[in-house]
Amino acid sequence: MEKEILKRLAEIEATEDVTIFYACESGSRAWGFPSADSDYDVRFTYLRKPAWYLSIDVEDKRDVIERPINDELDISGWDLRKALKLLWKSNPPLLEWLVSPIVYIETFSIADKLRNAVAEFYSPMSSYHHYLHMAQGNYREFLRGDTVWVKKYFYVLRPLLAMKWIQSETAPVPIEFQVLVDRCVDKPELKLAIDDLLARKKAGQELDRQPKIAVISDFIEKELESLGNVVDLERRNKPDFEKLNALFRNALNEIAQDHRD
C-alpha cells in the first residue's frame, strides 16, 4: 500500500505541478488504533512555483488538493501558505501531522522548520476547544443511550484525554493514543477496559452497535461535564506572523534552488 500511496502522490505532483515536501498518515493508523479494514488517511503539504503566488488573484486560488475517497485511501493536502496560516491559529490537525509516526515523504528542510516553530505558535486554548468540540460531537452522535457504536469510543476518548493532557502538560498533544492513555488514565479498571477494547479493534472484531461499556461510558460522561468548564489555559505570547512570512519565502527559495540545480 505504501508503494500505491507514493505513486498517487507522484501523480498529484505531476498533474498539479506542485512539489510535495511532506506527506504522512493521519487518523486511526497514526493514532495507534487501526482495525484490519481501516483506510489510509494520507495528508500532505506542498508548494507551487513562485509565479503562482505572485498572481494578483492568488487569494481566490484554491489552496487545497483533494482526491476522491475510496474504501482504501483518503488523500488530501494543503498549500504551504494555508498550512502557515493554520499554524498561526495553532490548528491541532496540522500539529498532529507534523509528529505523525508514519511519514511517506519528507524532503527539504521545510517540515522540520515547521516543527521548530510549533513551540512558539502552539495555543493550549485553541487545541482545547478543538478537542472539546470533537468529543462533544462524537458523543452526541454515537455514544448516547444503552446501545452505542462501540468503535466510536476511541473518537471520544482520544479528544478527552487530549484535553486532560493540555491541562497538565506544556507540550502539544502527542498523536499516539497509547501515550495519552498511559499519561492520563490512572484508574486500573478503566485502563484495562480501554486496553481490551483496543485489542478487539486491532484484531478486527465487529465493534458496531452493542451494549455500552459501563466503565468507559461513566468516565466519558463525567469528563465531558468537568472538562466542559473551560478555564484560561493560554500560555503563549502573541506570536510574530513575520516569522511565518520568512519561513514561506525561505521554503520557496529552497525548492527553487533545487530545481535550478
Image (cartoon, rainbow, N blue to C red):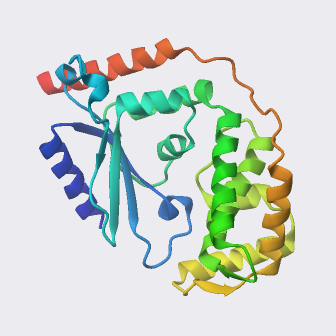
Figure quadrant of the N terminus: bottom left
Task: Answer with left or right where residue 255 lies relative to residue 136.
Answer: left
Task: Give the answer, above or below, for where 128 lies relative to 80.
Answer: below
Figure quadrant of the C terminus: top left
Task: Give the answer, above or below, for where 252 lies relative to 75.
Answer: above
Q: Where is residue 111 in the image (x, y as percent from the top left)?
A: 41, 34
Most foreground residue, 37 or 128: 128
Tag count in the figure? 0
Quadrant of the rendered image containing residue 156? bottom right
Most foreground residue, 189 or 152: 152
Q: Position of residue 123 (x, y in %)?
A: 65, 31
Residue 109 can be seen in this image: no
Residue at figure coordinates x 87%, y 67% from the top left: 187
Task: Answer with left or right where residue 212 lies relative to residue 74.
Answer: right
Task: Give the answer, above or below, for where 209 lies relative to 233.
Answer: below
Residue at figure coordinates x 33%, y 17% from the top left: 249
Q: Where is residue 85 in the image (x, y as percent from the top left)?
A: 46, 28
Residue at figure coordinates x 23%, y 63% from the top left: 4
Most foreground residue, 63 or 122: 63
Task: Give the answer, above or below, for where 103 lies relative to 192.
Answer: above
Residue 133 can be seen in this image: yes
